[in-house]
Amino acid sequence: MSEQALSPRLRWVSVVSVWALAVIGAIASGLVYSAGETFFGLAVTLGVCTLAAFSAQLLTRQKVGFVDRMSTSVLGAVVILAVASGVYGLISLAAG
């Protein structure tokens, strides 16, 4: 029995959806939380993105490439949230 490979389109949809969630969570953290709590919001967003990545990759029902898709999803979310963290840090420094 051979496994069918996941189509490239579905592979990227499952990865980029987690990145989009990270962008939405980063923006929401800046809007909802005060200056001292923004980093807590980013940490919660990373946790949600990790769970969403597991869910998205399990929903594809493909064993082949699971680790690659999972690591790409989470690493992208980490990079997005690190950039947002730097931006919010600079904003809080500028505000005094």
Image (cartoon, rainbow, N blue to C red):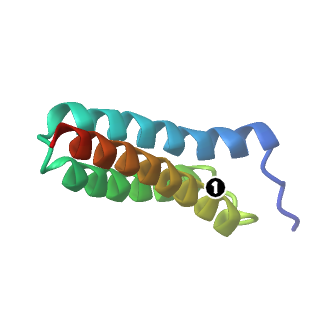
Left or right: 45 in relation to 59: left
Q: Residue at x 43, y 37 (%)?
A: 23
In the rendered view, tell whether residue 94 sits above or below residue 46: above
Q: Position of residue 76 (x, y in %)?
A: 56, 52
Three-letter amino acid code at the position of disc 1:
Arg
Residue, disc 1: 61
Going 71% across and 46% down the picture, which residue do you hit? 11
Say which element carries label 1: loop
To which quarter of the image does residue 87 belong? top left
Measuring from the top left, give residue 62's x and y in whole percent.
69, 58
Query: Where residue 69 appears, x then y in whole percent?
Result: 66, 58
Compare residues 75 and 94 and report the one nearer the observer: 94
Query: Quadrant location of residue 10?
Result: top right
For mark 1, does the 10 Å Cα neighbourhood hold few (<14), some (14 to 19), or many (20 or more) residues? few
Establish if 79 lies above or below 63: above
Image quadrant holding the N terminus, namely bottom right
Residue 46 image point, x, y percent: 37, 56
Q: Nearer the viewer, residue 44 or 10?
A: 44
Q: How many marks?
A: 1
Q: In the figure, is residue 87 to the left or right of 14?
A: left
In the rendered structure, the answer to whether residue 54 lies left or right of residue 44 reads: right
**In this picture, is 53 found above or below 35?**
below
In the rendered view of the protein, which quadrant contains the C terminus?
top left
Q: Is residue 69 left or right of residue 25?
A: right
Pick the residue in front: 68 or 92: 92
The residue that appears at 18% across and 38% down in the rendered structure is 95
At x 49%, y 52%, the residue is 77
Farthest right residue?
Answer: 2
